[in-house]
Image: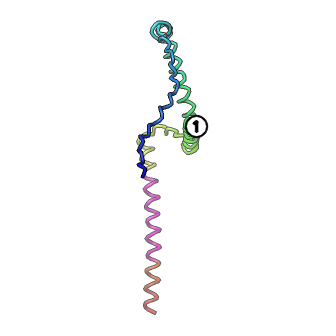
Amino acid sequence: MRRRSTRKKTNPPPISTPVVVEQAEPEIVGEDIMPFVLRHEDEIINYIKEKATKATLTSLAPLLEKLEQAVQEHQAYQAATAVPAAEPAPMDYDAQLKKLQESSMMKVKEKELKIADRMNKLQARFSNIRK
């Protein structure tokens, strides 16, 4: 009989991947760009402000147009409905008294007409009841 031999399986050596070493460039920010930024800081801030203002105005332009239209329509409506208020000439006491008497006489006549109309209706009802 033969004995079976057990061999240990060895793992193959891992395949090595080439390592790429990137050479880092020294930072330029500290020396070259910073003086430029410091010298032109106001220009950069103004540029950013202008861009932000333009973007805001372009987004608000339709709303501003609608608001202007609404204001114009409102002004046109007010101009159409507004009656020019002419100030009455100052009246003396006699003229004011006469005007008030005329208006009160007109009111009394209207009330008398209403009362006469009601009386006629009542008389018509009474005559219908007696028949």
| Boundaries of the magenta span | 100-119
Q: Residue at point 45% right, 84% down?
A: 125
> Which quadrant of the view contains residue 95?
top left
Where residue 32 sits: x, y (%)? 50, 7
Residue 42 magenta-highlighted:
no
Kindly tell me whether residue 83 is visible in this rendering: no
Where residue 37 sits: x, y (%)? 49, 11
Residue 114 magenta-highlighted:
yes
Looking at the picture, tell me which residue is in the foreground, 114 or 81: 81
CA neighbours of label 1 inside 10 A, class few (<14), some (14 to 19), many (20+): few
> Which quadrant of the view contains residue 11?
top left
Q: Is residue 66 above or below residue 24?
A: below
Where residue 88 sits: x, y (%)? 49, 39
Looking at the picture, tell me which residue is in the foreground, 75 or 125: 75
Amino acid at dot 1: Pro
Q: Which residue is mark 1?
A: 62
Kindly tell me whether residue 57 is visible in this rendering: yes
